[in-house]
Amino acid sequence: MSSATPTSARVRRLPVVGALRLGRPSDVWFKPALSVVAAVAPPSLLLMTLGRLDLAPYTMAGSLCALYAHNRPYAARAKVLAWVILGMLGGLAVALVSASLTRNAVVLVTVGALLAAVQKAVCDATRVGPPAHVILTFVSSAALFVPQTPGQVPGHLALAAAAGVWAWLVGMAPAPLRPHGPERRATAQALNAAAAYAETARGGEEGAGARSAAYAAVHAAWQTLLAVRNRPSTTRRALERLVIRAEVALAAPADADPARLRSWARAVRGTGRIPRTGDPRREEDGLRREEDGLRREEDGLRPDGVGLRPDGVGSRPDGVGSRPDGVGSRPDGVGSRPDGVGSRPDGAGPCRTDGGARLDDDSLRRDGDLLRERDELVGVAAERAVAPRPLWSRLGPLAPVAVRSALGCALAGYVSLALGAERPYWALVTAASLYQANITLTWSRAVQRVVGNLVGVLLFAAVAPVAQLGPLALVLCILACNFGAEALIGRNYWLGSVCVTPLALLVTELPGYQPTGELVTGRVVDTLVGALVGFVAAVAVTNRRAGRRVERALTTVDRAREHAARVAADPSSTPAALEAARRGLAAAVVDLRATADAAAGEWWQRALPQERVVLVEQAAHRTLAATVRRRGLLPDPGTTSTYTYTEGASP
């Protein structure tokens, strides 16, 4: 069953306690935390030594780019980081030029709101990943309210660019030590998610949430592995085979071995050798024991002197010397080459014409495994050849979110100005940080932002006396807040905001110390204004396209399922065509679940076809199982396995 349940409710209850619940920390929480410290520290300490700590906000703008792309392969990370740095410099340039041309606060707030909307839309369309547009909006919005002259703009941009280059080097630094670290982590997560779903299915539970999470993890693993196109790698191919095994487990969870999946996941992490997967059609315990015995015992001869062992182990009653699983033999038992080398005169099995020993069964098994592995990966190669969708086609569906961002940020800034705030960009950034895929998630983020900021100002009040002891103390406090924010934000956004708030307040003291009470009061007021006005704007600008997007996603899944079923039923289908059809259907199912979940959290719209979503997901999962079985990665029902069951391709 899907995680979705049929419902006709138009307005959903808004969570409060659930929004503050802590989750598990990320497996690599320390990577962005250490990266941002390594990126911020050298430029800040250098400027402190030169007595120009007032320029640190510009270098920090570039240094914060080190937070991005930690889940990307290094070849892809290099490009993403470069684009993030260029995007940061572009927003900063617009902000600095605007600040140098006018001091009209209303105009500056308007420019900041438009920049926030563009940054939000582009980051969502490109799926740049956390921290997404928030850092870029913070940098550009803060720069709008720093007094500038046109002559200072190039120098400030040069400082940000130099720090951005340093951040790029920091982000790429682990590549020589762990060249496939991101791919390994994504593969391990897919294997663990598949194991969790297999355990749920074996326990007799419904497992809808576990199945959706497993499909999403596998899809994310493929996205990571395919992010580097046309770069063949032995390690990456081995990881792709493991992800295929995770897909096999999703197709037939009752046949999957969760312990083996988890052991593969543990082995993949680190820099050790990637485990080699066996043929899923030969994984029954009895067959494994028989094959192990065949490998351990010495070869013998048949009574007629032709390739039979004295104890008869490994021979078939008819004397045909094929492998137990039949791989590598023809149905008629004839295994001759055109030149006659390597065939027995009676065609019963592999032997040399010169009367030598029988060919090694292990060699035949390796040849068969290589052929199967090649077939498994042809679809991967086909998918790498597909060009990604153009950016403009991905921006269209994000129009409601962009309008929300522009309207909410502008109104938050205007209200803050009306209340006499000196830094209206705090309210603007608060509003910009709220907007998520739907109203429900936006509300949750508003709760998290308010709670985190209120606790954060208390932390700042405690830290401020220490930070004001001197420039070095201030820099060290900023570094500590950077580390704490990235270390904690993975558990819940509000927990990370506890450190983000004092960080933002400490940055304002880089040009000179300011009264703590005024900073705390201004931050609290702007946080409340930004959260309230931003959420009201989100309610006012609903995403009425959400229902139509669900309908389109359903149609896409139906078409992909019908295509995959036709390909699976066609005996002449090539492995590449079958794999491409299966991968296309899996991606459509993941997109349907994300689209349905996003639409379910929207207000003021007609009831969603939740029952149809459930039925379409079920039919798609049956077809995915059939395509995996058609590829030979699973036995047909009732053949090799004692309890394998995969449903047919039709709903």
Image (cartoon, rainbow, N blue to C red):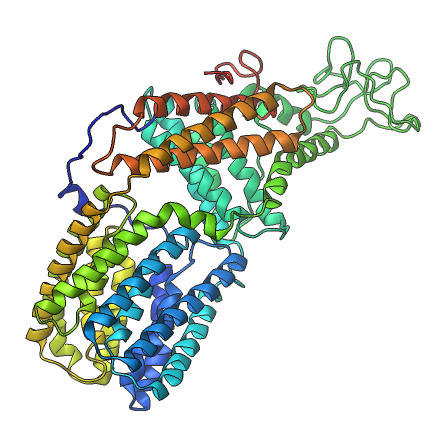
Give coordinates of residue 416: x percent, y percent: 13, 66
In this rendering, position of residue 302 left or right of residue 492: right
Q: Residue at x 88, y 15 (%)?
A: 346
Give coordinates of residue 314: x percent, y percent: 70, 18
Give coordinates of residue 361: x percent, y percent: 73, 28
Q: Name the one closer to the observer, 479 or 436.
A: 436
Give the residue furthest to the bottom.
Answer: 50
* Picture layout, residue 71 above or below residue 348: below
Give coordinates of residue 77: x percent, y percent: 49, 59
Residue 547, quarter of picture? top left
Q: Name the one closer to the observer, 432 or 230.
A: 432
* Picture layout, residue 58 above or below residue 359: below
In this rendering, position of residue 10 left or right of residue 137: left
Q: Residue at x 39, y 79 (%)?
A: 157
Q: Is residue 620 something that shows in the picture?
A: yes
Quadrant, the N terminus: top left
Q: Is residue 278 something that shows in the picture?
A: no
Q: Name the one closer to the observer, 230 or 482.
A: 230
Q: Residue at x 21, y 63 (%)?
A: 428
In this rendering, position of residue 154 left or right of residue 379: left
In this rendering, position of residue 264 left or right of residue 18: right
Residue 276, quarter of picture? top right
Q: Residue at x 76, y 30 (%)?
A: 360
Callout count:
0
Give the residue furthest to the top.
Answer: 317
Quadrant, the C terminus: top left
Q: Name the one closer to the observer, 428 or 55.
A: 428
Residue 615, quarter of picture? top left
